Image (cartoon, rainbow, N blue to C red):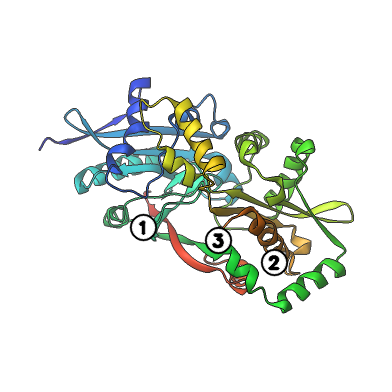
């Protein structure tokens, strides 16, 4: 067996290798959901992704002879370090065949890059931050990921820990059956929600698509304010959140994007989206397949076959002055009421920090059960 060589991506051909390599890792794993090639190219493009307005990155390939056997990226997120007052470098896009030597070489390359950049420690995986896809799946491998969530083979955990990486934080994904929830809603919960609504004169409404840009600004204000004290959080820039909003707009159901108002001001918001991974997995994008055909198949599975039975609650936030008042439970309850008539069978609430006691209690009160765990790893390099 030839020696493992690590090479930085330097040209479009190597970038395409970096993007398409995961198809080798997951060719016999039925739960993986392939990304769209065009989306990955844009996401990794330093001239098109707003992340690079405050970041630098290098992408690496691991090769044995002429065969690519793994990938990893190392990067600096200056905005994250400034906001969190830390000095960390990140790694992400870690994909590797069952090859411990290649895995070790890839992790060493990322650590060396982070150390050379002057950072004290490395943390990941993230692609590129907790506002994007992040964390390593460590249980629940026999189920596809929901939209914007990660998936990986079980052996990645062993490779990271063998390299000396330790747990930085776990996050949980909760599942709840929507029809079952609607049949068993405790009347006490309904009464509490109504009392919360009346006591604080709250008005809950769907997103106004005819005011899309203004609504995005309202959502951003709540999101950045409500999450600012959370572990791992970094505020999204205007360019980042506008790009995310534009990418989600075609799949948004305004009935499932909720705004809670008090005195005419938005004080809470939640974003739930259909799990298009179910349709995308059936359409199966792959290198060389015409993307127009993939999109047509995705639309058919989604809108014609009605194959999308999962909903993902992506984000839910409440302004600090309205926390601990039951506003989050009110939004969860309202989301379920609106999702049930649309045919959704399941909802995932993710991801939730294991240390977020208030949110975990609220979800468990509603009947949510942890069904997947994800982990962020860290290691000192200085």
Question: Picture quarter containing residue 114?
Answer: top left
Quarter of the rendering occupied by the N terminus: top left
Label 3 residue SS: strand
Q: CA distance from mark 2 to mark 3?
A: 15 Å
How far from the left and from the top, in percent, is residue 169? 47, 60
How far from the left and from the top, in percent, is residue 197? 82, 66
Residue 378 vs residue 272: left or right?
left
Q: Nearer the viewer, mark 2 or mark 3?
A: 2
Number of other residues with Cα within 10 Å of mark 3, as a class: few under 14, some 14 to 19, many 20 or more = many
Dot placed on the residue nearer the N-terminal end, 3 or 1 = 1
The residue under label 2 is 329
Is residue 227 something that shows in the picture? no
Dot placed on the residue nearer the N-terminal end, 2 or 3 = 2
The residue under label 3 is 352
Of 331 and 222, nearer the camera is 331
How far from the left and from the top, in percent, is residue 361? 61, 72
Number of other residues with Cα within 10 Å of mark 2, as a class: few under 14, some 14 to 19, many 20 or more = many
How far from the left and from the top, in percent, is residue 369? 51, 69
Q: Is there CB contact under 8 Å for labels 1 and 2?
A: no
Q: CA distance from mark 1 to mark 2?
A: 29 Å
The residue under label 1 is 141
Label 2 residue SS: helix
Residue at the image position 32 percent from the left and 37 percent from the top = 23
**Residue 161, placed above or below residue 308:** below
Of 201 and 317, nearer the camera is 201
Q: CA distance from mark 3 to mark 1?
A: 18 Å
Q: Is there CB contact under 8 Å for labels 2 and 3?
A: no
Q: Which mark is residue 69?
A: none
């Amino acid at each position: 067996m030839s020696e493992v060589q690590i090479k930085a991506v330097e040209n479009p051909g190597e970038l395409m290798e970096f993007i398409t390599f995961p198809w080798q890792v997951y060719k016999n794993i039925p739960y993986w959901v392939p990304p769209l090639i065009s989306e990955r190219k844009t996401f990794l493009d330093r001239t098109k992704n707003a992340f690079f307005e405050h970041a630098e990155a290098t992408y690496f390939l691991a090769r044995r002879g002429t065969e690519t056997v793994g990938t990893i990226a190392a990067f600096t997120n200056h905005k994250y370090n400034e906001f969190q007052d830390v000095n960390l470098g990140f790694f992400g896009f870690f994909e590797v065949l069952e090859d411990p030597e290649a895995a070790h070489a890839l992790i060493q390359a990322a650590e060396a890059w982070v150390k050379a950049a002057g950072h004290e420690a490395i943390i990941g995986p993230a692609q590129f931050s907790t506002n994007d896809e992040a964390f390593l799946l460590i249980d629940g491998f026999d189920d596809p990921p929901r939209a914007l969530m990660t998936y990986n083979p079980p052996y990645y955990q062993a490779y990271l820990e063998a390299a000396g990486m330790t747990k930085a934080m776990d996050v949980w994904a909760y599942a709840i059956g929507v029809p079952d929830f609607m049949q068993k809603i405790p009347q006490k919960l309904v009464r509490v929600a109504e009392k919360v609504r009346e006591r604080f004169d709250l008005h809950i409404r769907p997103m106004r698509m005819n005011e899309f840009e203004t609504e995005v600004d309202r959502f951003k204000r709540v999101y950045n304010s409500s999450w600012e004290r959370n572990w791992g959080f970094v505020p999204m820039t205007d360019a980042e959140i506008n790009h995310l909003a534009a990418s989600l707009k075609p799949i948004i159901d305004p009935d499932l994007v909720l705004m809670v108002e008090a005195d005419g001001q938005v004080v809470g918001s939640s974003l739930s989206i259909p799990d298009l991974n179910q349709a995308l997995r059936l359409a199966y994008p792959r290198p060389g397949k015409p993307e127009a055909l993939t999109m047509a198949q995705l639309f058919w599975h989604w809108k014609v076959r009605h194959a999308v039975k999962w909903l993902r609650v992506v984000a839910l936030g409440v302004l600090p002055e309205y926390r601990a008042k039951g506003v989050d439970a009110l939004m969860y309850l309202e989301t379920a009421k609106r999702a049930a008539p649309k045919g959704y069978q399941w909802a995932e609430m993710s991801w939730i920090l294991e240390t977020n006691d208030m949110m975990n209690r609220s979800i468990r009160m509603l009947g949510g059960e942890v069904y997947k765990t994800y982990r962020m790893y860290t290691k000192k390099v200085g």
